[in-house]
Image: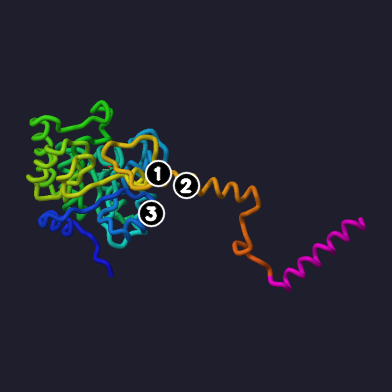
Amino acid sequence: MTKKITVRTLKKMKESGEKFSVLTAYDYSTAKYLDEAGIDVLLIGDSLAMVALGYDNTNCIGIEEMSIFTKAVSKGVERAMVVTDMPFMSYTIDISSALQNIGNMIKLGANAVKLEGCNDYIIELVKRCTQMGVPVMGHLGFTPQSQNVIGGHLIQGKTLDATLQILKQAKKLEEAGAFSIVLEMVPEESAKYITENLTIPTISCGAGFYCDAQVVVSDDLFGKFDSFKPKFARKYGDMKDLILSCAKQYNEDVKTGKFPNAEEIYKLSDEDARELEKYIKEQKNVITCN
Ligand code: KIV
């Protein structure tokens, strides 16, 4: 029986200086393979809005869609911790509806949720979630759900003041009970300082080497999504090429009669085949006589 990754495992890993891996996952079979590969945390990121559903940005996805993917990923995983990204406006209207939406994700199989930002409301929500038994992953630096207020995909924490501001927010999240914090698009030196001053792990999303963990959108890692590639997302494969070459070969094989072959079909028993042949002949005779 594989030992499940929990908030305790991740805290201990930070304490011993052992890094952990986080990847996004959106469907059952990919989640199963990422779990088998030893990825420690699988995040059903709202990035799925763009990479799996073709929306223009991550704010287009709703709680119903996130629920479907949360259920699928959770079913594929034994060891990894499963974290669901709470989508835009699903946790910011009021505490009561937020807790309801968050609770539903846990009922569908998630082990924790991710919430973006830090203000008095978010701090209160993190406290309430933690009290109610829901671990929260924070998300600071560039927070995509606020991209319209920020004014684009911009690096955050670029000055000493801005770095200290992120650290202050991170400490508030830590005190409220968050078990980890994603730092997105933060300069490496700033992320290092923030990481060294927290007891909970930081997860880099374009925040350099010194965070306690790294997260990448899996479609970027696999070379599947080609609309754009963030500077920090290393491509480990070329799934787009693989999909194109499989689909082109299949298309050609269907059209030239090479698919399916004798091993890829079901056959009637000799007796049933004879019976069918006889029936067809009789039908033809009937049609001819008429
Ligand atoms: O939506 C997402 O995939 C994310 C991570 C990349 C941090 O939030």
Q: How is the image coloured?
A: rainbow
Q: What amino acid is found at the position of numbered circle 2 in the picture?
A: Ile
Left or right, 229 with respect to 285, comes to left
- Residue at left 29%, top 52%? 42
Give SS at disc 1: loop
Locate residue 180, reporting x and y percent.
Answer: 17, 49
Locate residue 284, reporting x and y percent.
Answer: 85, 59
Which residues are drawn in magenta? Answer: 269-290
- Residue at left 63%, top 63%? 262
Give SS at disc 3: helix
| 234 is higher (above) or lower (below) than 273 | above
> Is 281 contained in the magenta span?
yes
Q: What amino acid is found at the position of numbered circle 3 in the picture?
A: Thr
Of 203 and 241, the residue lying toward us: 241
Q: Give the spatial CA distance, label 3 vs label 1.
A: 13 Å
Disc on the earlier residue, 1 or 2: 1
The quadrant of the image that shows the C terminus is bottom right
Task: Please give the label number shown on residue 224.
Answer: 1
| 119 is higher (above) or lower (below) than 287 | above
- Residue at left 20%, top 38%? 117
The residue at which mark 3 appears reads as 30
Disc on the earlier residue, 2 or 3: 3
Q: Give the spatial CA distance, label 2 vs label 3.
A: 15 Å
Locate residue 211, reporting x and y percent.
Answer: 16, 46
- Find residue 206 and report its image quarter: top left
Overall secondary structure of the magenta stretch?
A: helix
| 47 is higher (above) or lower (below) than 262 | above
Q: Give the spatial CA distance, label 1 vs label 2.
A: 9 Å
Of 154 and 90, the residue lying toward us: 154
The residue at which mark 2 appears reads as 243
